[in-house]
Image (spheres, helix red, strand yellow):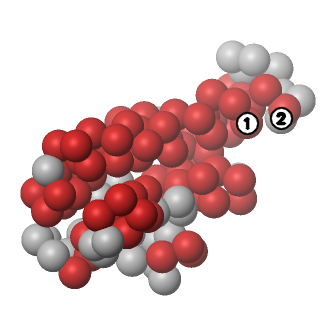
Amino acid sequence: MMAAYLCGSIPSAVWWGRAFHGVDVREHGSRNAGATNTFRVLGPRAGVPVLLLDVLKGFLPVRVLPIWSGLEPHSDAWTAFRLMLALAAVIGHLYPVFARFRGGKGIATSLGA
């Protein structure tokens, strides 16, 4: 569960903006750390990679972590575990520990989950 939260906590919009454009997207546009604001502030060359990273933050924990859970695939417990992982990843995007709990809206991460 913690791994899914930490994966969701990776602030891809903030890190991408700072690394490649020297801009913190949370200081411009809607002041949101998500793909939509990255599109608005930095354009599609930054927005598309951030969107893909945000989708992966939801997709990877839900697909990879259940493999190591020891639960029988497609059982009720396995499905419930995957739902909890999805929720943890989205909460990580909303309240990222790596960005002082100022995250995005969780749309792309929810889509990936």
74 shown above or below 82: above
Residue where numbered disc 2 is placed? 69
Tell me what residue is drawn at x 84 percent, y 32 percent: 68
Give the Cα separation between the discs numbered 2 and 1.
7 Å
Identify which residue, 44 or 97, lies in the foreground. Answer: 44
- Between circles 2 and 1, the one closer to the viewer is 1
Q: Residues within 10 Å of mark 1 (few under 14, many from 20)?
A: some
The residue beneath circle 1 is 65
63 or 19: nearer the viewer? 19
Q: Amino acid at mark 2?
A: Ser
- Going by the numbered disc 1, the residue's amino acid type is Leu
Q: What residue do we see at 59% from left, 35% from top?
A: 60
75 relative position to 68: left or right? left
Residue 80 location (% of width, % of height):
64, 36
| Residue at x 55% of width, y 73% of height | 98
Image height of 88 relative to 52, above or below: below
Crowding at dot 2, Cα within 10 Å, few <14 / some 14-19 / many 20+, comes out as: few
Q: Looking at the rendering, which quadrant does residue 45 occupy?
A: top left
Q: Secondary structure at mark 1?
A: helix
Mark 2 touches mark 1? (CB < 8 Å) = yes
Please state if 110 lies on the left or on the right of 74 as rendered: left
